[in-house]
Amino acid sequence: MKKRIICTVINDLSYDQRMIRICETLVAAGYDVKLIGRIKKKSVALVPRSFQQYRIKCFFFSGKLFYLEYNIRLFFYLLFQKKDIINAVDLDTILPAYFNAIINKKIKLVYDAHEYFTELPEIVERPLTHKIWLWIERFSLPKIKNAYTVCQSIADIFKKEYHTHFEVIRNVPFRYEFNIINKKEKKIILYQGSLNDGRGIEQMIDAMEQIEGAELHLAGEGELSDYLREKTANSSAKNRIVFLGYLQPEELKKQTLQAYIGINLLENKGLNYYYSLANKTFDYIQALVPAINMDFPEYQNLNKAYKTSILIPNLDEKNIVDAIKLLLEDKKIYNQLVDNCRIAREEYVWEKERTKLINFYNTLK
């Protein structure tokens, strides 16, 4: 009989590329998988997948009451589901999973840390909120036997703080199948991800006023969506800034393949950003798109192995403008980064990384 894994997230399921990859991989490895998330006001119909999907409906949509309601609903939903393994993704779903595993000792609990949750800017900047999530982290992490995360820096922090070992399973894409000579009609500067605070999007919009011959495309939505659209409307570069909204994974891949430069800017507002290794980094590499990243530890390590991007120390507008102009104007440097991406893309692929994921689940403690 197949072992049943239930994976829990707090977001809509439609655009979560990492969880789609993980769930499909586990199904292919012989597990029965169900992914649980939440439904939002503007949620689109779910695309049928090889795994089951379920979205919880909540009365509240944000704030502390939302997190409380979702965790209570998730706890009771899990309680009445057949399961052998619960994979709690990030700290905001750990408690329902943990207490279900306490009630049924036969259940194995897995913690998947997509990020350093207690160091997110929106948490660090709110003392009471930070205190609550820090308590949850300190309560749960020392008790967890099976855990993995996206980069070595975060794994090292958790090991030092809680003596809990985390495997590293990087958030890399499947190999892109495309014509290596990919003609790009426009010089598109692409940002993919949430339109949230600390992502350098405001600074990019400002920088575009000094950039000629290129467009900025923003793929995603977030808490700053309305503000950024208003800011763009008042920019002299407004005709060269395009909001693409939420995109399904396949459509996002098409957009990435058409990009000339990839953007992954972060403000050092918390250790989560400082030690991040975003999935978009590897999407850009797969598509042979040189990127602009931050001069933070994981990107330094990546550039030491394969120099695929330009690193900048902070989000000063001049740094952003200089980096973009360098890639737009210096063909030699640009083509060298493309060549490096061509080498790196053979290493950073899910076809290799998924072996670690399958071995992890096959050897749970």
Image (cartoon, grey):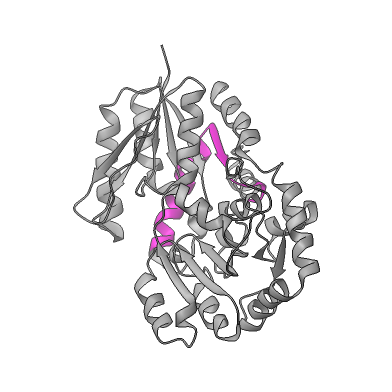
- Bounds of the magenta segment: 129-153
Q: What percent of the width, then of the height, locates residue 59?
A: 18, 53
> How many marks do you count on the picture?
0
| Residue at x 50% of width, y 40% of height | 112
Furthest residue in direction left, as rendered: 59
Q: Report whether 232 appears left or right of 290.
A: left
Residue drawn where x is 61% and y is 49% of the image: 154
Residue 13 horizontal/vertical position (percent) = 36, 45
Q: Nearer the viewer, residue 340 or 315?
A: 340
Image quarter of the C terminus: top right
Horizontal relation, residue 365 to residue 16: left or right: right
Instruction: Tell me the chief SS of the magenta region.
Output: helix
**9 relative to 104, above or below:** below
Q: Check residue 133 for magenta coloring.
A: yes
Q: Quadrant of the N terminus?
A: top left
Regarding residue 166, the answer to whether it shows in the image is: no
Query: Which residue reaches farthest top?
Result: 1
- Residue shown at 60%/42% (left/top)? 177
Image x and y of residue 183, in percent? 63, 59
Q: Is residue 52 visible?
A: yes
**Image height of 315 relative to 332, above or below:** below
Question: Where residue 194 sits: x, y (%)?
Answer: 45, 61
> Is residue 30 shown in magenta?
no
Relative to the observer, which residue lies in front, 72 or 287? 287
The residue at the point 49 percent across, 83 percent down is: 237
Left or right for 140, reference 289: left
Residue 191 as seen in the image, left or right of residue 74: right
